[in-house]
Amino acid sequence: MAIRLGDTAPDFTADTTEGKINFYEWKGNGWAVLFSHPKDFTPVCTTELGAVARLKSEFDKRNTKVIGLSVDPVDSHRKWAGDIKDVTGSELNFPLIADPDRSIAMQYDMIHPNASETATVRSVFIIAPDNKVKLTLTYPASTGRNFQEVLRVIDSLQLTATHSVATPADWKDGDDVIVVNSVSDEEAKKKFPKGFTAKKPYLRVTPQPNK
Ligand code: BEZ
């Protein structure tokens, strides 16, 4: 079954490069990014895992744990980690799930049979502290993902979870944000002491409130 925004992320227990992990226990009360790869020893995946390893401190700053998944077994993942270090210079510093029976891939709908009967597509799930799915992305095998974009979405999700704002196109942390339409002008004056500009009655912008 497809996983949709607002669904509870399925729990699972799996072998990983960091030992057996129960997803909910490992994740705790923080945020998580779960992302899948078509298979081990493939070129695009090698660059992606190196990129995420390089950004690990950025995920840590956002109280976000990262975990990858590939359907190959854990001994294969461990050998592949050596190549990832060779090629990208980054040590695999987060767990990579082995899913040889594809049970997790099926739970998360990571296999799209019209793309491949056996390999997982490049899925990304951002999961909130309450285990609800906040973002899904699906990329084809031939396109490596932009993990700066994943960080940008986490910034937006964490901001909009605690303030009555939304973030506009191409927003990045520190840019102006949009006052949500459920907030009246009167309320907005109180909630956003730095003021707001009404470009249209339905489009009011204000400086990012937590900066
Ligand atoms: C890759 O990661 O390079 C890849 C994986 C599966 C199909 C095509 C490319």
Image: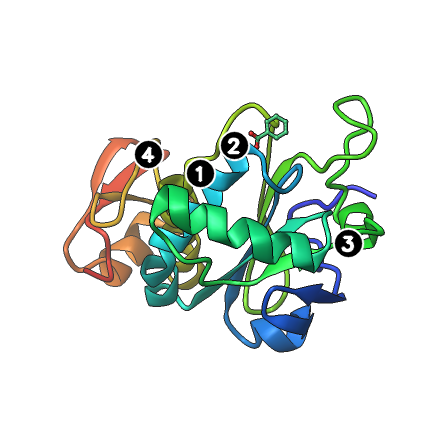
Asked whether the beta carbons under mark 4 and mark 2 sit within 8 Å of each other, the answer is: no
Q: Nearer the viewer, mark 2 or mark 3?
A: 2
Mark count: 4
Report the residue that reaches farthest toward the left: 194
Give 174 or 89, whichever is nearer the viewer: 89
Q: Indicate which disc, 3 or 4, sits on the residue closer to the N terminus.
A: 3
Residue drawn 41% across and 51% down? 85
Q: CA distance from mark 4 to mark 2?
A: 44 Å
Residue drawn 80% across and 51% down? 100
Q: CA distance from mark 3 to mark 4?
A: 41 Å
Asked whether the beta carbons under mark 1 and mark 2 sit within 8 Å of each other, the answer is: yes
Q: CA distance from mark 4 to mark 1?
A: 40 Å
Q: Amino acid at mark 3?
A: Ile
Q: Decide if ligand 1 comes within 8 Å of the CB at mark 2.
A: yes
Residue 197 picture location, percent across and down = 19, 39
Q: Which residue is mark 2?
A: 43
Q: Amino acid at mark 4?
A: Leu
What numbered label is drawn on residue 104? 3
Q: Which residue is mark 4?
A: 203
In this rendering, would 191 be left or right of 124?
left
Instruction: Residue 126: tell me if it is visible.
Output: no
